Image (cartoon, rainbow, N blue to C red):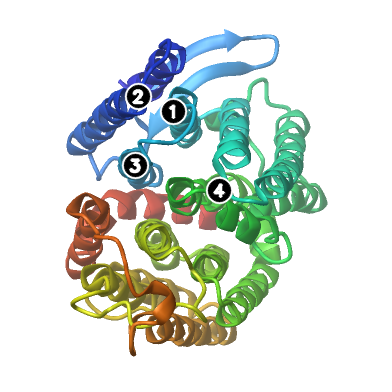
């Protein structure tokens, strides 16, 4: 059952990629069919998922390379299931939102499907080496998607992304190998690892590689510099996937392989991790305030909001870790919405510069519906009650405050700064008299608005009824944290 989530996009990638002289419209429709079927299958699995069962469900195990201790071991629990659904949803939206007239469409859509398969495999993998293989699988497709279909400086941005992510992979692989060899395990399977017997100094060394490796992917300051460049040069659909899904591989890795496998070392460095989270939150927010490019502002906001996940993981309470998972989903939905809307503005107005754009909320000649949706996204990102951003950040702060009160209060300042920079964006670009540079805007069709409307509805639904999101995750997280406490 789980293998279908990987095989479907791979089959779709092969069909779309090798279809001779395929048109843009046909390739998009075929890719969307495979992505939608995959998304529907994740929903079917979610319906059959038992939230009260904390162990891996729908497990698949096939011995692969016994000499290396590598097995094809897949499973779903409350940590991975919401991320799988998010990946399926945003992949479908990214394909739907792509331009039908782009060059080499078959190659483009096959890369997106290949990217989706790699991310899905990483979330399903219950073997360290298998996770690493899927983690590396998404590297080349994303590099090519930026390098071929990106902006003017796409070569620089794609190469920078490739170098940073390659270093990330090397550090993660070294830590994984160290965990298996030093613990005396005969395989890379998560269920067979016994890391608590390792000396604290060894655990700290291994955890250091995991923290830096996944810290690059999240990204956390000072390993963040690849992200704004990648977002600015990437096309809108690729920015949606990058912010909405791919960054979550980093936070997922910290929870699954850092906090869960090395609890003693994690508890030792937790105060430093909370401080690191504060630096990322405040630095990301400060940089966002200074931007005049709408897309770069949203990109820097991601750095700040992913810092909340690190704070919650450092606190390692059941409530804070639940908030971390909800923040991952919340950020994925909100950032995808904002990048989609900024992409529509750029396509229709020809600019993302806040010094050029004015009055886009003009009901007659502007983009009033797009502007209204951006206001919804801004409110959600700033933590306005009734939106999923509020409840996820509230749970993060409520769960982290008893453990790290000062760091939590400082991170709460980041929420205030989020309101500042997004109010700057809305005030400059959407209010006032329509600027002369964008006086004759092309029509915005409902097909342009549909993906954003879907995301806005989901953001509001989960904001009003967050238990629909939390009930999948809470038992798994409670068990994970209680196991941490016993080990510690």
Residue 449 at what x, y percent from top left? 23, 57
Q: Earlier in the sequence, mark 4 or mark 3?
A: 3
Q: Quadrant of the N terminus?
A: top left
How far apart, in angstroms, are the residues tagged by discs 2 and 4? Answer: 41 Å
Name the front one of labels 4 and 3.
Answer: 3
Alpha-carbon neighbours of circle 3 within 10 Å: few (<14), some, or many (≥20)? many
Q: Earlier in the sequence, mark 2 or mark 1?
A: 2
Query: Badge 1 is on which residue?
Result: 105
Q: Earlier in the sequence, mark 4 or mark 1?
A: 1
Marks 2 & 3, CB-CB < 8 Å contact: no
> Which sits in the foreground, 417 or 254?
417
| Left or right side of 46 for 165 | right
Marks 2 & 1, CB-CB < 8 Å contact: yes
> Which sits in the foreground, 281 or 67?
281
Residue 151 at what x, y percent from top left? 59, 50
| Left or right side of 237 for 234 | right
Query: Badge 2 is on which residue?
Result: 27
Query: Badge 4 is on which residue?
Result: 260
Q: Which mark is residue 81?
A: 3
Image point (55%, 37%), residue name: 145
- Secondary structure of the residue carrying numbered label 4: loop
């Amino acid at each position: 059952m789980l293998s279908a989530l990987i095989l479907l996009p791979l089959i779709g990638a092969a069909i779309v990629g090798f279809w001779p002289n395929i048109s843009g419209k046909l390739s998009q429709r075929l890719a969307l069919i495979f992505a939608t079927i995959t998304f529907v299958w994740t929903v079917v699995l979610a319906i059959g998922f038992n939230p009260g069962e904390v162990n891996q469900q729908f497990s698949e195990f096939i011995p692969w390379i016994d000499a290396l201790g590598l097995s094809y071991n897949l499973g779903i629990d409350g940590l991975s299931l919401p991320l799988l659904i998010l990946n399926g949803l945003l992949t479908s939206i990214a394909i739907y939102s792509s331009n039908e007239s782009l060059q080499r469409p078959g190659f483009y859509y096959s890369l997106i499907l290949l990217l989706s398969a790699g991310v899905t495999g990483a979330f399903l993998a219950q073997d360290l080496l298998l996770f690493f293989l899927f983690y590396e699988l998404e590297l080349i497709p994303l590099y090519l998607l930026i390098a071929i279909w990106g902006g003017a400086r796409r070569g620089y941005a794609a190469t920078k992304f490739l170098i940073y992510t390659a270093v990330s992979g090397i550090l993660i692989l070294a830590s994984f190998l160290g965990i298996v060899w030093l613990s005396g395990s005969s395989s890379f399977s998560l269920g067979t690892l016994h890391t608590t017997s390792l000396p604290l100094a060894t655990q700290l060394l291994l955890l250091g590689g995991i923290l830096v490796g996944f810290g690059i992917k999240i990204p956390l300051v000072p390993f963040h510099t690849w992200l704004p460049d990648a977002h600015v040069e990437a096309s809108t659909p690729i920015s949606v996937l990058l912010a909405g899904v791919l960054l979550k591989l980093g936070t997922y890795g910290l929870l699954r392989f850092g906090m869960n496998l090395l609890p003693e070392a994690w508890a030792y460095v937790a105060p430093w991790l909370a401080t690191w989270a504060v630096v990322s939150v405040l630095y990301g927010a400060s940089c966002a305030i200074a931007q005049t490019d709408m897309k770069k502002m949203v990109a820097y906001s991601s750095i700040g909001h992913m810092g909340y996940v690190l704070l919650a993981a450092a606190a390692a309470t059941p409530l804070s870790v639940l908030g971390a998972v909800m923040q991952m989903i919340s950020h994925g939905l909100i950032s995808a919405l904002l990048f989609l809307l900024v992409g529509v503005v750029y396509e229709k107005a020809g600019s993302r510069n806040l010094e050029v754009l004015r009055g886009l909320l003009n009901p007659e000649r502007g983009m009033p519906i797009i502007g209204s949706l951006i206001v919804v996204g801004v409110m959600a990102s700033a933590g306005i009650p009734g939106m999923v951003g509020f409840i996820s950040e509230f749970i993060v702060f409520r769960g982290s405050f008893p453990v790290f009160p000062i760091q939590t209060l400082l991170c709460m300042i980041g929420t205030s700064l989020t309101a500042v920079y997004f109010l700057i964006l809305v005030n400059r670009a959407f209010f006032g008299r329509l600027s002369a540079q964008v006086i004759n805007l092309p029509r915005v069709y409902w097909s342009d608005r549909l993906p954003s409307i879907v995301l806005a509805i989901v953001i509001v639904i989960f904001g009003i009824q967050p238990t629909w999101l939390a009930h999948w995750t809470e038992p798994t997280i409670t068990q994970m944290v209680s196991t941490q406490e016993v080990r510690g």
